[in-house]
Image (cartoon, rainbow, N blue to C red):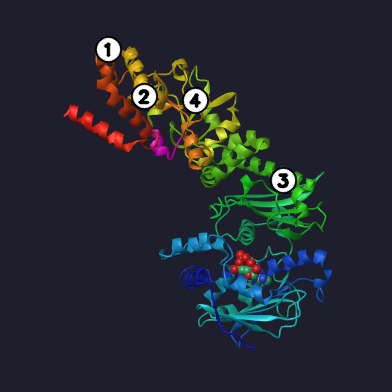
Amino acid sequence: MSAAPMPFRAEVSRLLDIVVHSLYSDKEVFLRELISNASDACDKLRYEALTRPELLDDPADFKIVLSVDKKARSITVADNGIGMTRDELVENLGTIARSGTSAFLEQIADAKKADINQIGQFGVGFYAAFMVAQAVEVKSRKAGASESWEWESDGRGEFTVEESDKTSRGTEVTVYLKQGEDEFLDVERLRAIIAKYSDHIAIPVMLEGEDKPANRASALWMRPKSDITAEQYKEFYHHVAHAFDEAALTMHWRAEGRIEYAGLLFVPSLKPFDLFDPKREHGVKLYVKRVFITDHAQGLVPPWLRFLRGVVDSEDLPLNVSREMLQNNPMLAKIRQGVTKKVLADLGKLAADNAEAYAKVWDNFGAVLKEGLYEDSDYRADLSKLLRCRSTAGEGWVSLADYVSRMKEGQESIFYICGESAEKLRRNPHLEGFKAKGVEVLLLTETVDDFWPGALESFEGKNFKSVTRSGEDLGKITGEDKAENKPAAEGTDDLIALMKLTLGDAVKDVRLSDRLTSSPVCLTADEGDLDIHLERFLKQHNQIRVPSKRILELNPKHALIAQMAERAKQSGAADHLKDVAWLLFDQARLLDGDTLSDPVAFSERLGVVLKKAV
Ligand code: ADP
Ligand code: MG
């Protein structure tokens, strides 16, 4: 039976284009990808067979066989794993299931040299064969099915699927080599590639006609650390994480005692593209006694460690545990505790031993770890030590311990300010008084930063306080105080009264400020009110209808305010200063990144005031 050709989905065509033209410098990795898929297919069947043993009909032993046909100039990778139905062939080899792939491909469409390190995450795997192939043929019989199917394509936009004569279970991928790729017909070359990339694969990889596997065929995570080379860890990381970078941190350990498991986990050196996918799924595979169970065991690692990649292999969970049963399994909860503690401890060690390497991890995953600070009280204390922030003390990352060690006499709180970017925050008027006194302020710029200071409450006994909040803090701190201390001008009280009267309900209060040195005004939140930045965030997400009123602080040292105070004593001042009062209020809003409540009124007032000034 022959079938009409089907087109690849658009993103596959684009991907193939990239693969064929620029992607890998090492073409040999196509073999690693095919063997990796064959191994995954065996893992999947082994899991299915736990509940449906009849699926493992004839050969119950899993293996992957590589054969070469010099006449046809082809190599074949055959496995006796789970196999694919017709629909699965179309779906798995004709589309890219992963979310975000299209968007990513669009983004790199112009880039001449696509970044392999990034594209690896998208499961380019199978398509890598087209680097060396003029055509690829995939014959497959799904375990338990009575028919088999054959997929074929030259990688140029279309593929066909028709019925096949394959009688055994599993999948055979045949790669018909392009001119000039004959090196892959050499068995010794293949042996070397397997040794290099596939030694850690737990299923035996056989060269046809030989009876000894060409790889070690034992689970890498069960081998003693001393037997494993850095290169082998790296290859395993690439296999398990579908990654192509060097892991930033490799953690390999065995827990023994009340619960027994082995863990081999990696912190990537690149941010996975779906790190902020709302599903927040992690990338740690669960095995039970060497049998693969699932990629997404809910509860195996907390969502705020979802950047981890690797394997956890339990000795205690029952082999017939269903994926559904895992959800609230107390044993799994214990494993999660152990894994979480180990990872936090190792991150702490990295931070202590190699601040630069840790800074890179924080650059990539700090925002995710901070979610834990907010939502997981069990690990808050550990996470607060790992926390790094930007601050007014300099350009680099600052730890809370650093901050506390630099606190001034009389300073009781850890001060922070939230906003869009560190650059903008550095110029925020709220910081003026703190700068003048040499008091450090943390500059927080991520969404989660609006939340964790409230959740964490304190560090080494010091509470967290936003500088946009009113309070007497600065007065109590004996700093170097670079600002000159002129007494407030006479008439300041009149000015305050006048401004309160003018602004009325638009503000909660008008006060003199001790936090301003060069700006005339700023808005602050009253003690019990929401932080200004947090409130804006909640408003954007429709969590708040009625905004809180703010306190307008005046800088008595500022020439404009002093002049206004002078004028405020005289008669008819209210009329004269009304427009200026409103303009100052609007200016303060703008400086906080807010919008004008009434742009028309604003420009009218500005017109009046400018006219007087000219
Ligand atoms: P990935 O392995 O990252 O999922 P690939 O491009 O390597 O992406 O493979 C795509 C999909 O094709 C796999 O997820 C799998 O469902 C299917 N597949 C590929 N090779 C095999 C195989 N030998 N046996 C069964 N399924 C396979
Ligand atoms: Mg693959």
Q: Quadrant of residue 286?
A: bottom right
Tell me the SS state at disc 3. Answer: helix
Residue holding disc 2? 503
Quadrant of the rendered structure where residue 433 is?
A: top left
- Label 3 packing within 10 angstroms: few (<14), some (14-19), many (20+): some
In the image, is the residue at mark 3 within 8 Å of ligand 1 by its beta carbon?
no
- In the picture of the structure, the residue carrying the numbered disc 1 is 569
Return the residue found at the far left: 614
Q: Quadrant of ligand 1?
A: bottom right
Which type of secondary structure does the marked residue at label 2 adopt?
A: helix
Structural distance between the alpha carbons of marks 1 and 4: 44 Å
Q: The residue under label 1 is which amino acid type?
A: Lys
Rendered residue at 82%/75% (across/down): 57
Q: Amino acid at mark 2?
A: Leu
Residue under label 3, please give it.
Answer: 336
Disc number lying in front (3 or 4): 3
User: Comparing marks 1 and 4, which lies closer to the viewer?
Assistant: 1
Q: Which residue is mark 4?
A: 406
Residue 339, how many percent across, how many down? 70, 45
Relative side of 393 to 269, left or right: left
| Cβ atoms under marks 1 and 4 closer than 8 Å | no
Disc number lying in front (1 or 2): 2
Q: Which residue is painted at 51% across and 23% down in the image?
A: 527
**Three-letter amino acid code at the position of disc 3:** Arg
| Up-down relation of residue 467 to residue 448 (above or below) | above
Quarter that holds the C terminus: top left
Query: Is residue 510 placed above or below 398 in the rendered structure?
Result: above
Task: Give the x, y percent position of residue 28.
Answer: 56, 71
What stretch of residues is rendered in magenta? Answer: 417-427
Check disc 4 and give the amino acid type: Arg
